[in-house]
Amino acid sequence: MRIGMLIIGTELLQGKITDANTVWLAQFLRPWNLRLRMTMTTSDHNEDIQAALQMLYQRCDVVVCSGGLGPTADDITKDSLAQFFGKKVIPQAGARVVAEENYARFFRTLAADHGYGYLPEDFIALNNPSGFAPGLWFTENKRYLLAAPGVPKEFRDMLTEHFPKLVAPMMKSGGVINLLNFRTRGVPEERIFKELAPGLWDELSAFGAVSSLPHVLGVDIGVTLEGDVELKTARVQQIMRQSPVAPHIWHEGHESIEEVIVKKAREKNLTLGFAESCTGGLCSHRMTNISGSSSVFWGSVVSYDNSVKQNLLHVNPGTIQQHGAVSEATAMEMAKGAREALGVDIAISLTGIAGPLGGSTDKPVGTVWVGVARANELKALRFEYSGDRETLKLRFSQIALYTLLDQI
């Protein structure tokens, strides 16, 4: 079954917001052995929506539409869909009931003439588990449309509730698909396939479609397998584990570094914490994005100013005076102080220069020290990266999480 996605929103094309629904939908489809065939993003203009629908319906069996179902003047998805399918937008009792139930959930009353009570002919209104605007479902000539609001939580909740009931029964068995993913670190994409393992791509291609996706300080190598999945999976895993890339693989799967850390820390009953200077709490933010992280992550001290390093983490003022805030000695004392203050098994500290100012010959912009404190170990590691301030903060947090995973 070929699935396409239409994302409607001028604000996306203007860079005011970023699209989060495509990535989520692609991941959501994996257990169904389905993949997105194509996605299109359009403005809130009818002619653009019509053109996108035309292309998607030529190539896809199911179109998932995101955005444009709200109450404002630029929310024209219903009108555009009606035009595309040659329908009229009319009052519909079913849509009214769904909208009233959505409003009642938030202890509000739907206005008598509200547009949520109108739908294109032959469309079905779908309950919105976490918002006001009803979704839409339409079938014609063995083609299916499921439209949901663009707000990420509403989009996800609506797809989670309605996709299994509406789309799944229409699916034809296409065989088993397995998406293998090997997450690597410390070696760039170009070096992997040109120097480290120049024949790896062709070797993996014998078993399925190969993909390479660079991410922060690493590369994901993916292989899509069909047919005799079990045998192919074992063979691909053997190739990867015996290849020169193997020492750089930190995880087999699609989980994030944060998810892997939480899982492994749980398994070993370890508690974790941070002392963050240059990252300003980014490591903690990333960890607390994971549901259940509170079972292993106890807290963090954002010690941006030296006075906080001294007063809360008990970094010796002489250490900062002699070695500087960005130094091996300071990083170690920060980690030690965080471990004692938070009462955790492992504490990771970061102190660095994110720029664009503050660098020197000995400590250029992009320098970061990552400290590690355990019951019987205290050390710090130095790294240097390039990039603007935002990029460096992300890279600093990533190497800190890699370091934490190594310790676990």
Image (spheres, helix red, strand yellow):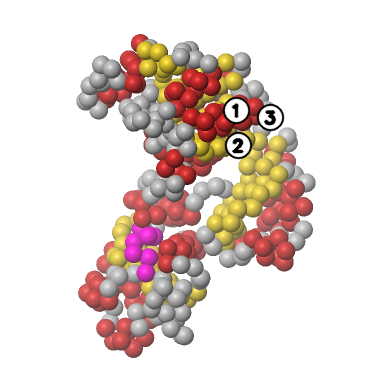
Q: Is residue 167 left or right of residue 334?
A: right
Q: Which is nearer the N-term, disc 3 or disc 1?
A: 1
Query: Horizontal placement of 358 versus 166: left or right?
Result: left
Q: Residues within 10 Å of mark 3 (few under 14, many from 20)?
A: few
Q: Determine whether 274 is above or below 38 in the image.
A: below
**Which residue range is magenta in the image?**
278-284
The image position of residue 49, as x and y in percent, is 51, 31
The residue that disc 2 covers is 38
Question: Helix, strand or loop at disc 2?
Answer: strand
**In terms of secondary structure, where does tag 3 sit?**
loop
Quadrant of residue 380 in the image? bottom left
Side (left or right) of 213 relative to 42:
right
Residue flagged by tag 3: what amino acid is it? Gly
Residue at the far bottom: name it: 322
Rendered residue at 33%/28% (across/down): 71
Which-is-in-front pick, marks 2 and 3? 2
What is the number of the mark on residue 382?
Answer: none
Q: Looking at the image, which is closer to me, 13 or 186?
A: 13
Residue 398: percent from left, percent from top: 47, 62
Gap in angstroms between the C-alphas marked 2 and 1? 13 Å
Q: Nearer the viewer, residue 185 or 142?
A: 142
Q: Residue furthest top?
A: 93
Q: Residue at x 71, y 52 (%)?
A: 238
Q: Which mark is residue 175?
A: 3
